[in-house]
Image (cartoon, grey):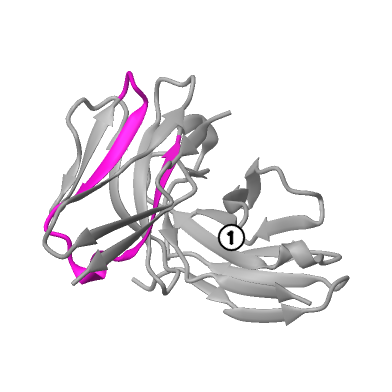
Amino acid sequence: AQTVTQSQPEMSVQEAETVTLSCTYDTSESDYYLFWYKQPPSRQMILVIRQEAYKQQNATENRFSVNFQKAAKSFSLKISDSQLGDAAMYFCAYSSPKGGSRLTFGEGTQLTVNP
Amino acid sequence: KAGVTQTPRYLIKTRGQQVTLSCSPISGHRSVSWYQQTPGQGLQFLFEYFSETQRNKGNFPGRFSGRQFSNSRSEMNVSTLELGDSALYLCASSPRGAGDYEQYFGPGTRLTVT
């Protein structure tokens, strides 16, 4: 079974600074996808960024980028120029073609952005 | 396009009762997945429906069931409610139900069992 682990229950960052959230996963599959979702206090889950395992290039979406280390099974999220609106719970998630739409989530990291 | 909608948004039930939650996916999306979110267990996958068929099921007791209609709307039912069923239930839809597609989440239904 696939597992996703986020070892940082809480993180904080100063506004305009950079923060990195960590995620590791375990799988025996070679084809899979990794995601970072954001859940603000409204509880609405929002996709931040995704990475296909077959792509060597790290995904980037504006201020959000990932560091995907396939051999190490590591998938960290870097948020640059942090904004107050980035404050939320961040979840790392895994899916594979064999699992349909099923997402396996990590425990989450609560990010606080200090003004 | 309208987003994923879930009804009701809040629900209070008594232990032993049953409850039905509803999810309307984004128009054109054929896959609907359900997740349970609790402080202790985090986000856990319940089941996925695709074209009216249950395609995947998580590790939940048989008290949890679901179905999908021909218009892709989905319902989940929990019978004989227990206190531990108190949670936020999230529904997500995607166009094709393949792992690479983005899933769009609804706002959730907050169920409280007393």
Q: Quadrant of residue B99?
A: top left
Residue B71 image-quadrant placement: bottom right
Read off the magenta span. A70-95
Q: Is residue A95 left or right of residue A90?
A: right
* Subunit of label 1: B
Q: Residue A29 vs residue B15: left or right? A: left
**Residue at 34% from the left image edge and 48% from the top image edge:** A36
- Please name whichever residue, B108 or B112, is drawn nearer the observer in this view of the structure: B112
In this figure, which residue is indicated by the disc labeled 1? Answer: B39
Q: How many marks can you see?
A: 1
Of B46 and A13, which appears nearest the observer? Answer: A13
Left or right: where A34 falls relative to B51: left
Residue A37 in the image, given as x and y percentages of width and height:
37, 53
Q: Position of residue A69 (x, y in %)?
A: 28, 26
**Residue in view at x 54 percent, y 61 percent:** B91
Q: Residue at x 40, y 20 (%)?
A: A30
Q: Quadrant of the N terminus of chain A?
A: top right
Q: Position of residue B103 (x, y in %)?
A: 41, 53
Residue B16 figure quarter: bottom right
User: Can I make out residue B73 in this image?
Assistant: no
Dot 1 surroundings within 10 Å: few (below 14), some, or many (20 or more)? few
- Answer above or below: position of B46 versus A112: above
In the rendered image, is residue B74 in sight? yes
